[in-house]
Amino acid sequence: MKSKQYTLISIEGNIGSGKSTLLRLMQQKYPDLRFIAEPVNEWQSINGDPSLNLLGSFYEEPSRWAYTMQVYAFYSRLKHWKEVLSDPLNPEDRHLILSERSIEADKEIFAVNGHKNGMINNLEYALYEKFYDWLCDEVFGKKIQKQMIIYLQVDPDVCYSRMQKRARDEEKNTISKEYLTQIHNRHEEWLLRETHQNTSILVLNGDKEFESDLIQQDKMFNTIDQFLQELF
Ligand SMILES: Nc1ncnc2c1ncn2[C@@H]1O[C@H](COP(=O)(O)OP(=O)(O)OP(=O)(O)O)[C@@H](O)[C@H]1O
């Protein structure tokens, strides 16, 4: 029997670019997609214990915790993907999955940036790549037909002020503009300069506030509709 194949759509972008807001709006607009949210709360309290806050530890002492953060982020994302890809109750027509960030982004953005900046050393990075490649193949194998990426491109200064406004405890005094610029540059390199197979990329400018500005939202959704039209 031919195994089921999926199209993965992910929303990528800097910290504070507005991915969660866009995901929520897309959930309302395209109810037939399956959704995978980002498991941030799992990183803030391991086993539900807020004293075991990996995200907070990572931002307080990046070099000590960057590798551990990658291992756990990868594990927690992969666990959700595995549940969705092997869900027997998922009817055949729900083969379109929309997620906030992809597993690939974990590696291409955070692991590569951490390695480049010396927060993850060569030994740690080599180990990470080993289990990353093997486990991705185990879980995704030939199940992915196509990938579509919506890149919410936002100026790092705008991300910084949105992040300050939202004031997530772990981030507010620890994430610098410099870190946001590094993360921005990694997105630009990965999504605009590197080559991608079997992947379509839509670049969506998200500098203007779009949650409460309905005209801006309409403009964005016209572009997204066109990008996704081959799927419906
Ligand atoms: N693989 C990872 N390694 C290190 N930190 C990560 C990783 N993935 C996500 N994070 C951190 O987790 C937090 C939430 O991530 P993310 O940017 O994806 O969501 P967000 O800030 O809520 O986005 P938005 O504001 O666009 O909705 C951020 O502090 C981000 O840096």
Image: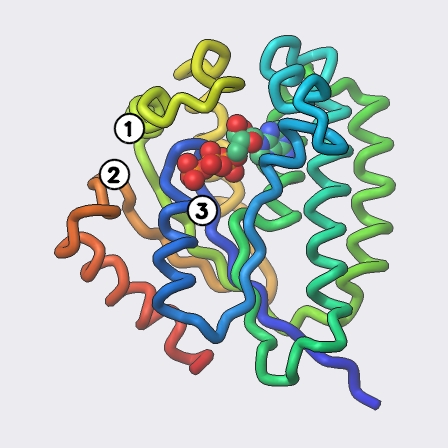
The residue singled out by tag 3 in the image is 192
Q: In which quarter of the image is the N terminus?
A: bottom right
Kind of residue sitting beneath label 3:
Leu
- Callout 1 touching callout 2 (CB < 8 Å): yes
SS category of the residue bearing label 3: helix
Residue lying at 61% horizontally and 18% vertically, measured from the top left:
56
**Measured along the vertical axis of the image, is residue 205 above or below residue 45?**
below
The residue singled out by tag 1 in the image is 158
The residue singled out by tag 2 in the image is 207
Crowd rating for badge 2 (residues with CA inside 10 Å; few <14, some 14–19, many 20+): some
SS category of the residue bearing label 2: loop
Q: How far apart are marks 2 and 3 (CA)?
A: 18 Å
- Callout 2 touching callout 3 (CB < 8 Å): no
**Quadrant in which residue 178 is drawn:** top left
Q: Which of marks 2 and 3 is in front?
A: 2
Q: Distance between the residues labelled 1 and 2?
A: 7 Å
**Quadrant in which residue 61 is drawn:** top right
Q: Which residue lies furthest to the bottom in this view?
A: 1
